[in-house]
Amino acid sequence: MKKIYVNEKWCLGCHLCEYYCAFANSGKSDMVKALKNIRIHPRIHIEDGNGVHFAVSCRHCVNPLCVKGCITGALTMRDGMIVIDEQKCVGCFTCILSCPYGAIMPDETGHAMQKCELCAKNAHGEPVCVQGCPNQAIVYEER
């Protein structure tokens, strides 16, 4: 299964992947109308530290602790990808505490969780963060 991988040597820390992600998941067709004057809630985020930048997103683990820890069954593995059923999520934050990578976060309402689902619902082919990375620091490949 293809997954998102990050080469921190190439990451500029520009945060464009965050904006592309937020736009892709906004449900709107115009990026400016979707993101202007709002606080974005991307499913990928950039960590900055000591001159090193890297994107953090779900790694779709083979034995995901987040799925095992989800008390409502909102997190499941489907075809190797971990997905969230927002209708089942009660916002208990157990998945956030269980994820060793910090890849799950509250959505804009704070009542449900969100994470990278490889743009399966909103893009065809590569995830939008990969397409928008100007330095090709984010790749979508099978390893």
Image (tube, rainbow, N blue to C red):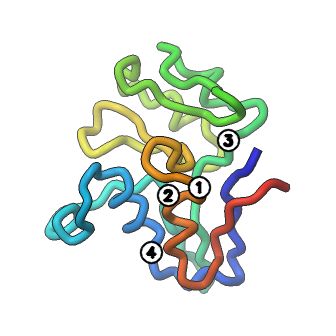
Label number found at residue 15:
4
Contact between labelled residues 3 and 1, with CB atoms less than 8 Å apart: no
Task: Classify 10 Å Cα crowding around label 4: few (below 14), some (14-19), many (20 and above).
Answer: some
**Disc nearer the start of the sequence (3/2):** 2
Mark 1 → mark 3, Cα distance in angstroms: 17 Å
Task: Classify 10 Å Cα crowding around label 3: few (below 14), some (14-19), many (20 and above).
Answer: many
**Disc nearer the start of the sequence (4/3):** 4
Q: Which residue is mark 3?
A: 60
Mark 4 → mark 3, Cα distance in angstroms: 22 Å
Q: Amino acid at mark 1?
A: Gly
Q: Residue at x 51, y 65 (%)?
A: 129
**Disc nearer the start of the sequence (2/4):** 4
Mark 2 → mark 1, Cα distance in angstroms: 18 Å
Percent x, y for residue 113?
A: 41, 36
Contact between labelled residues 1 and 2, with CB atoms less than 8 Å apart: no
* On-image quarter of the C terminus: bottom right
SS class of the residue under badge 1? Answer: loop
Mark 1 → mark 4, Cα distance in angstroms: 21 Å
Percent x, y for residue 94?
A: 50, 27
Label number found at residue 125:
1
Q: Residue at x 51, y 37 (%)?
A: 96
Contact between labelled residues 2 and 3, with CB atoms less than 8 Å apart: no
Label number found at residue 44:
2
SS class of the residue under badge 3? Answer: loop
State whether residue 68 is above or below residue 80: above
SS class of the residue under badge 4? Answer: loop
Percent x, y for residue 90?
A: 36, 21
State whether residue 7 is above or below residue 135: above
State whether residue 96 is above or below residue 58: above
Task: Classify 10 Å Cα crowding around label 1: few (below 14), some (14-19), many (20 and above).
Answer: few
Q: Residue at x 33, y 54 (%)?
A: 41
